[in-house]
Image (tube, rainbow, N blue to C red):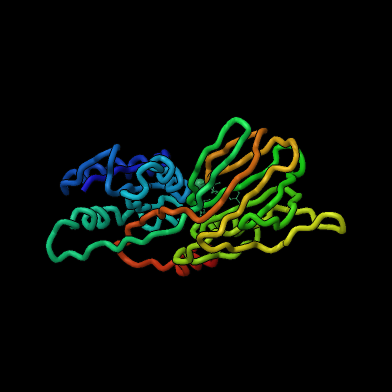
Amino acid sequence: MRYYVLDRGDQLSVDLSESFHKMASEQGLQLDAESPDIVVSIGGDGTMLHAFHTFIDRIPSIAFVGVHTGHLGFYADWKADEIPELIRMMSSHKDEGMLKPRIVRYPLVDLEIRKKSGTSSYICLNEFTLKSVDGTVVAQVDINDHLFEMFRGDGICVSTPSGSTAYNKSLGGAMIHPSIEALQISEIASINNRVFRTMGSALVLPKHHHCDIYSRKEQNLLLTVDHINLPMDDLISVRCQVAAQKISFVRYRPFPFWNRVRNAFLG
Ligand code: NAP
Ligand code: MN
């Protein structure tokens, strides 16, 4: 069992990752920064976003697990004082009779960003957003190659099911259970009046549908992929669809999504 640990960088998380390494080596786990089987994120949901993008090229062969050092997280569902138990479970995979960990797989959103200067691909764990740095965004939204609407406003958010509880929620989008392979498009302050009109509701697209967002004026845009900012002034279009690959999480014990939602937002 090869593992890697990424922490948020605050003192508590750094200390915990040090003690993680100590306990892990006692249990015969092997630290491997190149090709780990399990990547442990110690911090918050933001730390898991970092971990995901650090290993973006190895997503199909890695399972992630999150330890939270702040409030309860969506991706980080282990408490700091449970680390010894987590390590025991990680090291007992090989033993006879031990329960194999359940792996849950969550859908991701795949992006193809076309600029005058070239094309690049990204994968989001939470969401993609397109916003303007100077004034109103003007963008055409096509769904499955048919014109859907001309958008004017602050921006557009395209989220994964597990990202639906993050930025998307603040925009009035629905929370989507991650067993549903879908993406959600939500508006950021659209302009709606007699002249300009957008749908106004969040849209949920199934797998195998796609949405293209075309820049429709010369504009300085800020594209975001999770915590990553991509400023650009020569965007042509972005294609969004449910990604072919998924992220795997190790679940040594059940913690249903709706319980996490309740815990995080209602207490
Ligand atoms: P951040 O400013 O620390 O993140 C904002 C908050 O979102 C934090 O409390 C973070 O939890 C939480 N969060 C992240 N992923 C979540 C998820 N899947 N479900 C529920 N809550 C989640 O910045 P960050 O840590 O780098 O995270 C980047 C994310 O922030 C973006 O992907 C976006 O979803 C979110 N964001 C939200 C808004 C908004 O709601 N208005 C605006 C910008 C960005 P932790 O403290 O545990 O990290
Ligand atoms: Mn954060």
The residue at the point 45 percent across, 58 percent down is: 107
The residue at the point 75 percent across, 39 percent down is: 217
* Image position of 129 (left or right of 59): right
The image shows residue 165, relative to residue 130, as above or below, that is below
The residue at the point 56 percent across, 55 percent down is: 159
* Image position of 108 (left or right of 156): left
Residue 46 at what x, y percent from top left?
48, 47
Count numbered badges in the picture. Answer: 0
* Image position of 240 (left or right of 14): right
Nearer-the-camera pick, 52 or 113: 113
The image shows residue 190, relative to residue 122, as above or below, that is below
Residue farthest top in this picture:
117
Residue 195 at what x, y percent from top left?
86, 55
Whether residue 20 appears in this view of the structure is no
Whether residue 149 appears in this view of the structure is yes
Name the quadrant containing residue 30: top left
Residue 139 at what x, y percent from top left?
71, 47
Residue 83 at what x, y percent from top left?
29, 53
Residue farthest right in this picture:
194
Nearer-the-camera pick, 81 or 261: 261
